[in-house]
Amino acid sequence: MKKTILYMGTVLLMLTVSCSDDFLERPPLDDVSEETFWKTEEDLYKAVNGVYSQLPAEGFIYDDGASDNAHAQYPWESTATVVSAGSIITADDAGWNYEDKRRCNYFLENADAVENADPDLLNRYKAEVRFIRAYSYFRMMCKFGDIPLVTSTLDIEDVNIPRTPRAEVLDFIITELEDISEMLPVTYAGGKPDEKGRITRGAALALKARVHLYEGQWEAAVGAAEKVMNLGIYELFKIDSESESDLKDNYDEWVDFDGEEDRNNFRLGLRSYEALFHEEYEGNSEVILDRQRIAQIDDNFLNTYLPPGSIGGWSSVTPTQELVNSYESYKTGEPAELPSAEQRATWYDNDNPEFREEFRNRDPRLYATIMFPGSPWNAIEDDFTFEWIQGASNMSQTGYNFRKLVDPKIYRENIGNYTNVILLRYAEVLLTYAEARNEWSGPDATIYDALDDIRQRSGMPPVDRNLYNTREKLREFIRNERRVELALEGHRYMDIRRWQIAPQVMKDIKNLRNTVAQDRVWDDKLYLMPVPQSQRDLSDNLLEQNPGY
């Protein structure tokens, strides 16, 4: 089978049908007879695969849209538009959801009913489900702070429970990940029920490292990241050749190459970075966990959300000028020299060749991530060059579109996109290690080595150890490297909050003509999202509201 795990979500959905009239979405307890299920290992297999369908998917692009990385222009697609504008209200729901947690609890309460199940397999299945539950609680805690911590399915009279203090939720998440990391295998051999793509020890440790990083628990974050690194099974994905269509992209127009070796370094860095997200290379050496899709059933809509209307996309989430500015010089590894917003607009409006100079000699990840006026992409269409058509249907409001996460081969074949979506990858672990180690003990060779691995994979020069030689200088470098490497993967939303830079960076978005694409107002209440009033009403207002809403 093309995919390694089939999500038989219908099975678990039948067992845990949601109810629309309480804030924890309790299931009707008499909907399905317990006597018809939980009898065999096959039942366990189907049920645990059904829980996998609750892993998050491509919706993380909207977390970037709620940050300074991107503009989410359609408020009906997500709450990112109102969150980024600072206008979210209690009628909005930024992700208050218990369906996934309820499915996990239901599985964990019933799995032991299967008689004669292999105990090791049963415990492994439970660990996989506990990971999904911990991941869900972590994502929700990041958005709302205190949340009800529910670890069992609830009777009708028990469902209206208050929010659990954030510290208790955090302790639960860390303890769960620590426990299950010892139960999960490092790898899977393949074949039922050991398909590649299931949750591994590396996934539990990588998520644990992320949790500790977000909490500023530097030593613990270093320790968890080191455990992933020491497993010895992950490495940054690289390719050593270009496709026929890729070879047609003329980057000599954009980069002053110092010979053939330099040209190959740039081009293969660009290709390695962009290809790791394409279906052709899914499950590659860098992937720690991905949300898998079933062909013809479980669509991935990134090929629709991200491209411009000129090639059939919607421009749902588009890059900001500030994100574009963050890509350094390919030649020096230092910040690029940029024109003022006024000068850029004048050059753009007058079709002045000086406009192109801003995009010369930049980090290969810029060309792999962002479509800017004049940028080539023959893989998507022969002789394609991006053109911003302001005001046209489904076109960007900023002047840029995302290229990252769009699969050109699938676009050319005019078929549905069922590419797996990466949730945890090795580059993030290296960045976690670098940031946490620097904050904990200051610069050292291991930090530079981790950063150099990431940069050299994409064709960039190594970190200047003489320039970035203090904790403060290296901190800013790491933060920018994290922004560039993980762009559009959903991390920036929490990064600007945990670094407490959101008040400075969440400012009005301007387009290439230096006119406002989106008004943004920051208020400190936006460090947390509002508890939806609909959920408070269903709980008889037992759920307290976050400050400021």
Image (cartoon, helix red, strand yellow):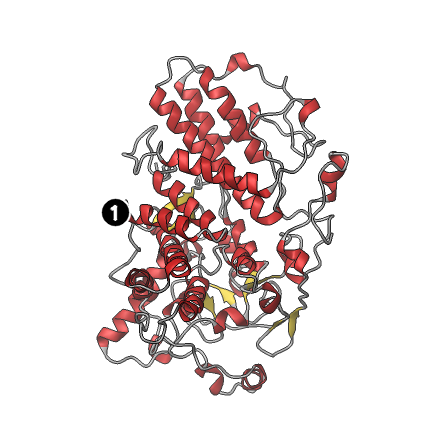
Report the number of discs.
Answer: 1
Going 34% across and 63% down the picture, which residue do you hit?
Answer: 451
Q: Quadrant of residue 253?
A: bottom left
Q: Position of residue 177 (x, y in %)?
A: 43, 38
Give the residue at the far front of this rendering: 441
- Between 122 and 268, the residue placed more toward the observer is 122
Q: Residues within 10 Å of mark 1 (few under 14, many from 20)?
A: few
Q: Is residue 27 above or below residue 196?
A: above
Q: Position of residue 511 (x, y in %)?
A: 59, 74
Q: Is residue 69 above or below residue 10?
A: below
Inspect this view and state whether residue 297 appears.
no
**Left or right of 55, for residue 246:** left
Task: Locate the N terminus by quadrant.
Answer: top left
Going 71% across and 59% down the picture, which residue do you hit?
Answer: 87
Going 37% across and 57% down the picture, which residue do you hit?
Answer: 437
The residue indicated by pointer 1 is 232
Inspect this view and state whether residue 145 appears.
yes
Q: Amino acid at mark 1?
A: Gly
Q: Quadrant of residue 192?
A: top left
